[in-house]
Amino acid sequence: MTRWRPGSRGLEGPGCVARAAPVLAGLALGLAAGCTRESARIALDAQRRADEVQQAVFERQHAALRVLLYRDLVRRLEEGGAPLTDAQRDAIGAAWNDRDLIEFWHVQHERAKALRRAGVDAQLWGSQAALDLLIKATEARLDRARTGLATYAGAVVFEGTEPGLEGQGSGGRGAAPTTPRERGDDR
């Protein structure tokens, strides 16, 4: 167990924040940059697994529906008992029409799967680009803040006053001028 010792500063003191800030900023930046790629990889893997499961379910359903149609056709033929009549021919035709409907469903399923996959990929890449734009916008704001801070510090050092506070009268810091004379309108 760690004990506090007299004279040790531990996590207190003015240097603590200065030492921890770059480490925390680097950690946050590393996590933000790495999360995008990692989350995209995880989402793609999850989508692939979901597609594999969906494909397995679809193949089983497709095979089961074909068997069902065949058994239904056999049952219909056995009910007739004799050589194929027009009714039996109609039953076979209806079964094959149902089979064609199932095959059409198969094609539609494949098309939907391809579109779903393309949509997920587009969404992931689209959201990743938005994160890159967000990072660039944040960097631009930081640059403007640094420039503003440097301008302020330069004005304080060279003029000895805080910029933007001259002529504000006795209102103190941040008080808005209320009369034309305080605003500089000496007409």
Image: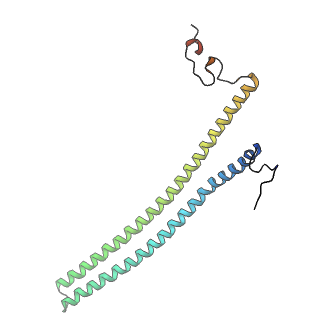
Quarter of the picture holding the C terminus: top right
Residue at screen point 37% across, 72% down: 106
Q: Residue furthest left?
A: 86
Quarter of the picture holding the N terminus: bottom right
Q: Residue furthest right?
A: 7
Judge from the rendering whether residue 12 lies leftward or rightward of residue 72; answer left or right.
Answer: right
Q: Position of residue 125 (x, y in %)?
A: 54, 55
Judge from the rendering whether residue 121 lies leftward or rightward of residue 161; answer left or right.
Answer: left
128 in relation to 142, above or below: below
**In the rendered view, how is the structure colored?**
rainbow
In front here: 19 or 59? 19
80 in relation to 120, above or below: below
In front here: 5 or 41? 5
Residue at screen point 56% across, 63% down: 42
Q: Position of residue 31 (x, y in %)?
A: 64, 55
Judge from the rendering whether residue 158 lies leftward or rightward of residue 94; answer left or right.
Answer: right
Q: Position of residue 88 (x, y in %)?
A: 20, 84
Residue at screen point 47% across, 69% down: 51
